[in-house]
Image (cartoon, helix red, strand yellow):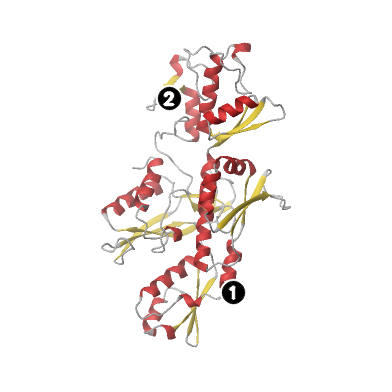
Amino acid sequence: MEFLTDVTIIIDEANYGEPGRLKESLTSCYVEKSGSCYKVRGTFQELEKLVFKLQQRKDFNSATHGWTQAQTIHLATTSVKSVTVSGVVMDYIEQIWAEKLKKIQGKCFLIETQHDTRSVQSKPPGSVLVTLRPRCESLHPADMSHLDLVRQRFISFYQRTASDLEVTSLHLSPHDQMDLHVKFPHLLFKSGNNKNEATVTGHFAHIAKLIMFLSQQSSNNSVDTVPASIPSSKSSGSLQSKQNESCPICIEPIVSKEKNTLRCKHSFCKDCLKKAFNYKPVCPICGQLYGILKGIQPDGGTMNITKDNLSLPGYEKYGTMIIHYYIPNGIQKEEHPNPGQPFQGVSRTAYLPDTSEGRAILKLLKRAFDQRLIFTIGQSTTSGRNNMVTWNDIHHKTSTHGGPSHYGYPDPEYLSRVREELKVKGIE
């Protein structure tokens, strides 16, 4: 995840008891000195860490006075940006996951959606603009970093939702749509031009369950509702009686010798399952992982570990393990969003406590890195630029302090959360 750039704070050495120690603290920063004041430039994350470090020194009175009104305005204007997303996906999120969206934006921020009317030839058709902005006009810079967290949470949730979303057409009466929505609350039903036709949007596993349910109901003649693209059993007999098990993917009866039953007890046609596993090695019904999941993280990156005796908040008895990730610039391959186009690499730093649990998580993260799951190529959550290397959905602590809202510590549940995120990807 990226942070704001070109942020400046002013530190007056008069507020510091020992100017020599202040100068030592600034050796790793870009500094200009004028009189007794140091002008320190860097990313929001870097300067936030510096301020926190200085505040821990007993001989420093106040570093936060360095935030000027102009810098607060700069942070506000650079943080409020629009992201172009799919209108279909956003409509699904707003209709089905309204409560989740409400939790993401919290009490201080707004997530606004409007049709993308900008005359940009490269923007995808059917797109909408999503803008994240503070509810009030003026915020302290620390609050603006919270806005960046809200943006990151939204983008992560949007990408996870969009990656597994499927749209299909069904022959359904309005009454059937209402009944099915109760049974399948995570699916969005919308009537088409014909009142007995509906477009259904949702996670591909939920779509598969719906189609299986409809095929079973159709074979029992209890309802006359089947997918629009699939012939009714009354007209073609393609949906056989209940004793002939149907494949949830193609909805055709499974031939015994072509049947493939997974450990989770779900069965499919061998060819259908092979095609599904080429997309993602998970059960199309329940999502259980099979085999080793590989990501699209660009090749040529490095993951190096160093240690520091300084402790993280909440782990005062232990040192810190520092993870240095580096992904160089390159050209996208066939597996990436825009093959043949260049992408911008990234350098990121993350922190773990040097405890037994922290070391165990580090080993799992190394496996995830080797399986190309830590990073992906997509749209930057701060600049809105495409073809950028970004975090995938395995969360890291990129700050040593500030708590969850600043991607830092203390956060007692973080190690267990990231372990669960890794487990979903088959890394445990």
On screen, 41 above or below 265?
Answer: below
Residue 318 - label: none
Q: Amino acid at mark 1?
A: Ala
Relative to 172, is 293 on the left or the right? left
Question: Residue 284: percent from the left, percent from the top?
Answer: 48, 30
**SS of the residue at dot 2?**
loop
Residue reaching furthest to the bottom: 35
Q: Nearer the viewer, mark 2 or mark 1?
A: 1
Q: How many marks?
A: 2
- Image quarter where the C terminus lies is top left
Residue located at (56% from left, 27% from top): 180
Which badge, 2 or 1, is on the more N-terminal residue?
1
Residue located at (59% from left, 41% from top): 95
123 vs 185, nearest the viewer: 185
**SS of the residue at dot 1?**
helix
Relative to 422, is 392 on the left or the right? right
131 vs 107, nearest the viewer: 107
CA distance separating discs 2 and 1? 60 Å
Q: Amino acid at mark 2?
A: His
193 vs 380, nearest the viewer: 193
Question: Residue 401: percent from the left, percent from the top?
Answer: 39, 64
Asked if residue 142 shows in the view, the reply is yes
Question: Residue 74: percent from the left, percent from the top?
Answer: 59, 69
Residue located at (52% from left, 29% from top): 183
Q: Residue at label 2? A: 266
Asked if residue 30 shows in the view, the reply is no
Q: Residue at label 1? A: 70
